[in-house]
Structures are given as C-alpha cells and as structure tokens.
Amino acid sequence: MDVLADILTAMRVGTPVAAHTEAHAPWGLRFDHTTGAGFHVVLQGSCWLTPLPGDTAQFAPLELGPGDVVLLGSGAKHAITSTPGTPLTDFSPVRNPTASPLGRMVLPGPGARSTIVCGAYRLRRHRPHPLLRDLPDVVHLSALPGRHHGLRAMVELLGDELESPSPGAAAVTPSLVDALLVYMLRAWLRDTPDGWSAAFADPATARALAAMHAEPARPWTVEQLGFIAGLSRAAFARRFTTFVGEPPLTYLTRWRMTIAARLLRDTDKSLEQIAGAIGYGSAFAFAKAFRREYATTPGEYRIATRTGITQPASL
C-alpha cells in the first residue's frame, strides 16, 4: 500500500488549475487566498515571492531563480514580482481549453523576461489529513545542483512542453502538473527530518500505516498492529504516537472518516455500503461516528459538498 498516494487520493478535489505566465520587467502579480495549496515553478528568469497584508501567513520575501519551486501549503495570499515593491496586478489568466489545458498570461514590458507556471491544487481543507495539515505556509524547493533530482527532472519536462509544444502536449501537460505535487511532497519530506518524514522512514510505523490503509475496515487492535510492526503493544503505541502525532486507533478512526467523506462526496454509495467499507457494523453506528468527527450528518455533508459549499476557491 502506497500511503502517500492513498492520502492524496482522499484529499484532492478535482484537477489542479495552472497557467503559463510570461512576464517582462517591471511586473507584479497578486494571488488571492485559496483553500487548496498554491504553487509556482520558475522556468526562466527570476522573481520575488512576498506576503500580502491581511493574511495570517506571514513570511520573509523570497528570491526565486530558474528551476526553483515553491508550494504554499496554506494557500496564503501572496504576490510574485520582478522586484519587491513593484505595483501589483490581479492574476487573471486567459483560458482556451481547445488550445491548451493550462491558462496563459502575458505581461509586456521593456525589461528581462521570466516564465513561471502558477497554479493551485484543489485540496479538501475541512479536517485535513495530518500530513497536509503539517505543511508549512511556504515550502521552498531550491534548484541547487545535487538536490531534488526527481523534481528537477519534472520541472525540465514541464518547461519543455510549455516552451516548445509538440503533438500530444495537451494530453501530457496536465499529467505533469498533476504529478508535480507528489514530487514536491517527496522533496519536502526528504528535507524534513521529523514528523511524517520520520513516520515513513521508520519501518515499524510504516508497516502499521500500510496495514491500516490497505484494510481500513478490519477491526484492528493495537496488539495486532504492534505484531505487524514487530513491537510489543506498548512500545508500538509509543513509537507510532511519537512519529504520527496521535495514537494508532485515533489515526485509524480519522482515516476511516476521511474515506467516508470522500465516498459521500464522490459516489452515490448508501450509508450502509460506506459503513461496511470502513468497518462499521451499521449505518447508525457510522452516522454517529461521522457526526462526532465532522459536526454534521453524512447526509448533510453529502448535500453540502455536492452543491459546492465546501469546494475550494479556483485560482
């Protein structure tokens, strides 16, 4: 079981939105808050990432160069500019689905040219998975030689497709943008020695996580999970809690409710079917547990998500 892939499948809502931006200095772009995670990939040139007033996420201005990638985990309001202090224009790309799945924005000017892919991943922010909840406001993944080989290769592929479109680009480009999130998260996990990086790296914790994700409906006990991890019940519980941030069965309940929320949102399965899929003996027991976690009934949650009330803002 690929736990990271399983988490992303459950937390993503729809496809990412992105635009190819060509800007000639002096220029500045303003980005509103999104309930997903924003990102920028500098293909050519350079720019500055700066915070905007009125957002809870505050960070120091950050200079970005060719190949640099930033992921804004909280979807904070921000700006990218040719130089700090440049007047800002709202980011409003033109979209032509028949020509390219990505939007496009051109900012004319007399100065140096920069090309950047600006986008956002649609992520469910109501009760996010702990891995996504722990994302910093800004993750800067530098293009320095010797670092993030897979991510750098992905950026080069994306740049080639956008700068010199070839037959089939409309099919390839969305897949590259989609896969980019996995490469960004991998790079962030490698750069972060504790938290979920440590949980994935620790064999005992990783085996237990894989077991819970592979069979979420199984009536797991701490003893059974400890056996899979190769530890005593007490030693496993301490180890798992240290790395994941919560006890094993607390995490299991959270994950079951995450699956239930996705099934309510994306399928027409009945409450009885969803209850069975996540290990509850009846629709009543499931509904009670769901309400305890989400402060709403499964039916109310399904209606809200189907009508777009909880959908993240578009870029």
Image (cartoon, helix red, strand yellow):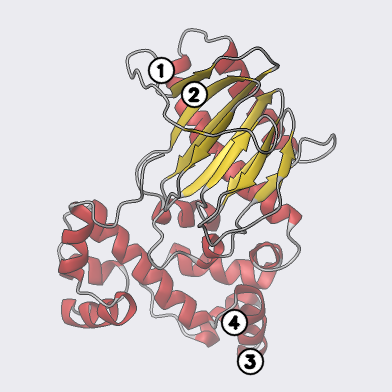
Residue drawn at x 71%, y 28% as measured from the top left: 46
Q: CA distance from mark 4 to mark 2?
A: 43 Å
Quadrant of the rendering where the C terminus is positioned: top left
Which residue appears farthest toward the right when viewing the image? 145
**Of the image marks 3 and 1, the number of the one nearer the N terminus:** 1
Q: Residue at x 35, y 63 (%)?
A: 259
Instruction: Locate residue 237: give its quadrant.
Output: bottom right
Nearer the viewer's eye, disc 4 or disc 2?
2
Asked if one can make out residue 169 in the rendered structure from this viewpoint, the answer is yes
Q: Are marks 3 and 4 in contact (CB under 8 Å)?
A: no
**Residue 216, above or below 12:** below
Identify the disc placed on residue 173: 2
Tell me the crowding category of disc 1: few under 14, some 14 to 19, or many 20 or more residues within 10 angstroms, Cα based. some
**How far apart are the two marked residues, 3 and 4, measured between alpha carbons?**
8 Å
In front: mark 3 or mark 4?
Answer: 3
Image-based side of 68 in relation to 93, left or right: right
Q: Residues within 10 Å of mark 2 (few under 14, many from 20)?
A: many
Locate residue 165, reporting x and y percent.
52, 10
Element under disc 1: loop
Q: Which mark is residue 226?
A: 4
Q: Nearer the viewer, mark 1 or mark 2?
A: 1
User: What kind of residue is marked 2?
Assistant: Thr
Three-letter amino acid code of the residue under disc 4: Gly
Q: Secondary structure at mark 2?
A: helix
- Residue at the spot of label 1: 100
Label 4 to label 1, Cα distance in Å? 50 Å
Q: Are marks 3 and 1 in contact (CB under 8 Å)?
A: no
Q: Position of residue 266 (x, y in %)?
A: 25, 52
Q: Amino acid at mark 1?
A: Ser
Q: Are marks 1 and 2 in contact (CB under 8 Å)?
A: yes
* The image quarter in which residue 146 lies: top right
- Mark 3 residue type: Ala
